[in-house]
Structures are given as structure tokens and as C-alpha cells.
Image: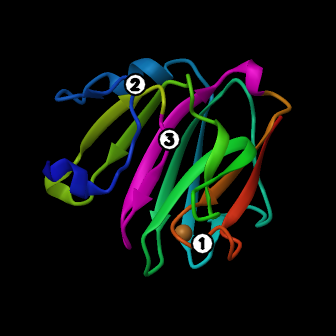
Amino acid sequence: MKALKLAVLITILNILFSGCSSGLDTETLKGEHVEYLHINLTEMSFSLVGHQKDSIHLEAETTYRITFENKGFLVHKFKIGSGNLIMSNDGKPSGYTKNFFEGLNTFINFDQPAQLNGKIETNNLEAIELQPGQTIEIIFSLPLSYKGKTFELGCFSPGHYQLGMKIPITVG
Ligand SMILES: [Cu+2]
């Protein structure tokens, strides 16, 4: 139950806790073009370090290692999706009708707090919640089928989306 306190909220079809760290990343990434991105979360925005601020561009057939770092003072719970916004009963946005990560094999590395460090593999990552100061790395390969599609990275902590904590993601 302690693991739930890590605040990595993941809806899971398939979850593997890997006790052995060797091979997980290196086998998956072998021979693929790997891009490293770092996205900072603050109140109330996402910013891609070293890039333009108003959108995030990804390329199909590329492997991404994206570090998300909560540099703010609040808890941020974010999702990536497309289609329409899902509204909760109280009329507030809670997510997207199409989940970016659905069917996408995704590795998650986390090391804060240190006693809970580990890796998760899932093919239905839905949401990630980061405490202030927390960092997580998401690794996935974008297939060709994503080319030309548009998504959005949005924060669904109460009120954050409405305050503008969202950024478009395009795939070329
Ligand atoms: Cu937020």
C-alpha cells in the first residue's frame, strides 16, 4: 500500500515491477533513435526545457525519454490525450476521451522518494501525479501511426486546466 503514496497514479492493464534493472531500457532502445526531453511543471504551466514554449513537437518512429519534474509548490496530476475533454459530475474537466498512451508500451522510471525507486512497464498509462520536487521519466517509442496527430498535455489537479495548465503536442 505504501507504493500508492508514491503518487504515481496509473491505470493499468498490464503492470510489471521489475526487480532487475538490467536490460529493460537497453534492449528496448537498441538501434532506435532516442530523444531526451525535460518538461518542467510549475503553477500553472508546462515548459519544455530548451524549446519554444507554446507547443511540444514529437516525431513518429522515434523513442522518447521524457523527464517530468515538478518545480512548483503544488501537486500536479497530468494526462496526455486527444478528442474531447471528459467532464466530471461537477462539470470540471478530468481528462480526454482518447488516451495518448493507450496501447503504447511505456516504461516509467522513478527514484523519488529513494526508498521506492523502481521501474514500471504498462501499456495503458493514464495519469501521473507528481508531488512538489518529484521527478519521473517516461520512455516510449512512437509508432508511424501517430504521425500527423495532435494531442494535448493537460493538468487535471482541481482548477489547473482551467487556469491554463495545458500545452499542445503535435506529432510529425
Ligand atoms: Cu497542475
Given residues 33 and 171, the one toward you in this image is 171
Circles 3, 1 touching at the beta carbon (< 8 Å)? no
What residue is drawn where x is 36% and y is 68%? 131
Q: Residues within 10 Å of mark 3 (few under 14, many from 20)?
A: many
Ligand 1 closer than 8 Å to label 2 CB: no
* Quadrant where the C terminus is found in the figure: top right
Furthest-front residue in view? 89
Which residue is tagged 3? 126
Residue 80: give its label: none
Which badge, 3 or 2, is on the more N-terminal residue?
Answer: 2
Quarter of the image where ligand 1 sits: bottom right
Which residue is tagged 2? 13
Which residue is tagged 1? 160
Q: What's the residue type where badge 3 is placed?
A: Glu
Secondary structure type for disc 3: loop
What residue is drawn where x is 74% and y is 28%? 60
Instruction: State the CA–CA distance, disc 3 to disc 2.
Output: 10 Å
Which badge, 3 or 1, is on the more N-terminal residue?
Answer: 3
* Residue range highlighted in magenta: 125-146
Quadrant for residue 7, please give it.
bottom left
Which badge, 1 or 2, is on the more N-terminal residue?
Answer: 2
Instruction: State the CA–CA distance, disc 1 to disc 2.
Output: 28 Å
Instruction: State the CA–CA distance, disc 3 to disc 1.
Output: 17 Å
Queried whether the magenta region covers residue 144, the answer comes back as yes
Q: Residue 147, image x and y in percent? A: 81, 27
Q: What's the residue type where badge 2 is placed?
A: Leu
Q: Residues within 10 Å of mark 1 (few under 14, many from 20)?
A: some
Secondary structure type for disc 1: loop
Ligand 1 closer than 8 Å to label 1 CB: yes
Q: Residue 142, image x and y in percent? A: 65, 27
